[in-house]
Amino acid sequence: MRETGWSPVCYEYDGSFAGFLTCVFESYAAKEEPVAFFAPEDTRYALWPTRRIDTHPQRAGRVYRALEPKLGVWGKRLVCRGFLAGMEERERHIWAFLAYGLRRGPEAARDLGDPRVDCLRRAVEQLEEEAHRYTGFVRFSDYGGMLVGEIAPKNRVLPLLRPHFVQRFAGEDFFLHDRTHREGLVYQQGRWSIVPVEGLTLPPLDEEEEGYRQLWRRFFHAVSIAQRENPKAQARNLPHRYRSEMVEFESEG
């Protein structure tokens, strides 16, 4: 719903969450309705006037601190996790929810009959479901003392996976590479960070690690019972799109 008297505009920003919150601040300060948000990788054309918004940490912080008082805990969760979701035009959907929520208050997040709320809720559920699956599907290999895993998720799941793997490998160094979003979760000497990764070339596996991979693949096939094979159940529990990242589905050699 368009804010009365507000001018439609397209915002160009750096693609970060702080940058998006700065856009929200600017939209209310200038009484502009952002009809499109363009991150650096966007190739779309603008049909409305376009304004470049530089990230302003203080303004972004003001918006962030207002999320819970204005929208409630669940409303803040929808905004923060919605930004990690892989839905198209996520920023526009989040802004529409924010505009609705700031008018109505915390009750807005529970209004599942409203399409703005329902759209964001479904996107967050898909994000959380994918992250949950990856806690069991990620496979790490040892590269000279550094555990390395690679995933290709639809959503930006690394922030949700971080607590699980930091706790699980608290005494190890590891690197989890998200090929889709070109970023990686690094954990070394008890400290973690999520960093941009333009490309990753791994060295050949050493003989010991390759031996462990072969043992795991053989165990996986040895415990299967041909008479009880159920491809539909296996596809439901181990969807095909995850299998290219799982050692047990790699071919020998």
Image: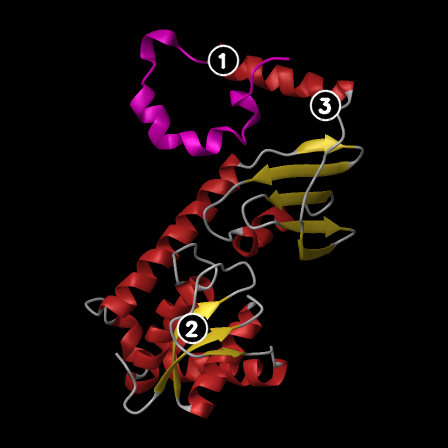
The crowd level at tag 3 (other Cα within 10 Å; few <14, some 14-19, many 20+) is some
Disc with the residue nearer the chain's start (2 vs 3): 2
Callout 1: helix, strand or loop? Answer: helix
Identify the residue position indicated by label 1 in the image.
221
From the top left corner, tell me how far across and down residue 151 is, in percent: 55, 40
Callout 3: helix, strand or loop? Answer: helix
Q: Amino acid at mark 1?
A: His
Q: Which mark is residue 76?
A: 2
How many numbered markers are drawn?
A: 3
Q: CA distance from mark 1 to mark 2?
A: 45 Å
Callout 2: helix, strand or loop? Answer: helix
User: In the picture provided, is 59 more to the left or to the right than 174?
Assistant: left
Identify the residue position indicated by label 3 in the image.
209
Q: CA distance from mark 1 to mark 3?
A: 19 Å
Q: Quadrant of residue 174?
A: top right
Disc with the residue nearer the chain's start (1 vs 3): 3
Residue range in magenta is 224-253
Q: Amino acid at mark 2?
A: Lys
Q: Amino acid at mark 3?
A: Glu
Quadrant (top left/top right/bottom left/bottom right) for the N terminus: bottom left
56 and 75: which one is in front? 56
Whether residue 214 is visible here, answered yes or no, is yes
Q: Residue at x 50, y 82 (%)?
A: 63
Q: Residue at x 64, y 44 (%)?
A: 176
Q: Quadrant of residue 245?
A: top right
From the top left corner, tell me how far across and down residue 108 is, in percent: 28, 76
The crowd level at tag 1 (other Cα within 10 Å; few <14, some 14-19, many 20+) is few
Q: Is residue 158 above or below residue 204?
A: below
Residue 245 on the magenta span = yes
124 and 178: which one is in front? 178
From the top left corner, tell me how far across and down residue 212 is, in percent: 67, 20
Q: Is residue 239 above or below residue 166?
A: above
